[in-house]
Amino acid sequence: MKILYTNFHYGDGGGHTTYIVSLARALHGRHTLHVAAPADSRLMRTVTEEGIATALPMDFGSGVPTLPQQLAEQRALRRLVRQEGIDLVHVNGARDHRFVMQGLLGMRRPPILLTKHNSKPTNTFGNVLRARWATDRVIAVSADTKRLLQRGPYRRCPIDVVRNGVDLERYSPLPAGSGHALRQQWTQDPQALVLVSNAGTDDYKGWIDLARAIARLPDAVRPHVHMAVAGHLPSAQQREQVQALGEAAAQVHFTGLLADTRELIAAGDVGFVLSHDVETISFACREMMASGKPMLVSDYAGLPENIEQDVDGWVVATRDIDAIAAQLQTLYAQRATLPEHGRAARRHAQREFGLQTFADATLASYQTALAGN
């Protein structure tokens, strides 16, 4: 099969990049892969360095000032589809989806498959057009995402639920003592409970809600609870929010962007993703579970689909600071049992989160789209 992946994100690209790279690594060698993305993106750099796909630099611009470049890129897209005999185009966002629709207009095109990566509503005119003219099948990364799609124009399309997979070998529990030096930078308290997240510092990730919950803990517990977040360093406004927590601000730690988050994960007792917008299923949550950490997640979108409550994680009401604080108290009280919850998280990941499971289910969607079903 000859597959073209498109992604409009510059720079790191977040979950979209992780998604396409994961698929490309799993399918490379069995299928011929092409990727269209901005030249400076992590996606382009990764597929080029690893030799897992042929790269087509593309900015996916919009607006009148970039119109000549857009037209040139769309011609390049058409040439690629024709000359390489692309069997299927897999789009991953509104901008590249629109671009593909426009670029392939009027030609006999291959099937176009869309993955819905976020929880943004789809009831817009642009989505109506793309659903009608440029979508043959849709992948929802959670059951919640499928329900969202069925309330909008994509309900006319076949929708498959294919949850994201992670590299179970890379994200596996590290040897005892890993992450100790990093943890010591945050606290040398032998009674500490440390929660960590590799989900980033965007506001919608909800890390400030956890910080506020720590600030509300009783005096006997609060000094022993710490949190650490990997991602872009917080903005001035975000730092002001943390400083407003008073003494608890000293228990909120930021590592900055990390090329490898495994030591961060190892340094914690529990992982967390408390998103309240945009999120669907969360690669970060699944990476932490695969690494042997139980998870604290909000009941937003597809996050609860990762968790077996009280076995490998805990679900709390979105943005409910008191509920988060109550769960923190429970976790602190039962911190001696957290390693067993972590082992359950690893077993859960091994059953359901593997890359091969993810790739096989995605391929099944491709084959069904190619069959015209």
Image (cartoon, rainbow, N blue to C red):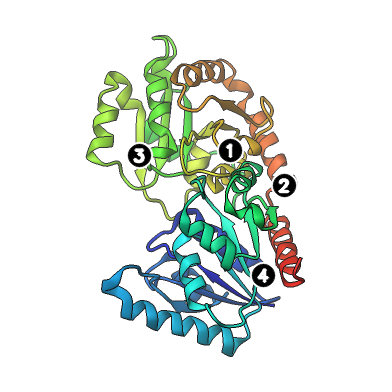
Mark 4 vs 3, N-terminal side: 4
Labelled disc at residue 254:
3
Q: CA distance from mark 2 to mark 3?
A: 31 Å
Residue 46, horizontal then vertical, whole percent: 48, 69
Residue 131 located left or right of residue 215: right
Residue type of the residue flagged with mark 3: Phe
| Residue 303 - label | 1
Marks 4 and 3 sit apart, C-alpha to C-alpha, by 35 Å
Q: Earlier in the sequence, mark 1 or mark 4?
A: 4
- Residue at point 58%, 58% (across, down): 115
Q: CA distance from mark 1 to mark 4?
A: 26 Å
Of the residues shown, which amino acid type is indicated by label 2? Answer: Glu
Q: Earlier in the sequence, mark 2 or mark 3?
A: 3
Residue 151 shows in the view: yes
Q: Amino acid at mark 1?
A: Leu
250 sits left or right of 157 in the view: left
For mark 3, give the secondary structure: strand
| Front label number (1 vs 2) | 1
* Residue 330 location (% of width, % of height): 56, 16
Q: Residues within 10 Å of mark 1 (few under 14, many from 20)?
A: many
Q: Amino acid at mark 4?
A: Leu
How far is disc 1 from disc 2 in space, using C-alphas? 15 Å
Q: Which residue is mark 2?
A: 352
Quarter occupied by the N terminus: bottom right
39 horizontally vs 195: left or right = left
Residue 71 placement (x, y as % from top left): 38, 80
Q: Earlier in the sequence, mark 2 or mark 4?
A: 4
Residue closer to the observer: 17 or 146 = 146
Q: CA distance from mark 1 to mark 3?
A: 23 Å
The image quadrant where one finds the C terminus is bottom right
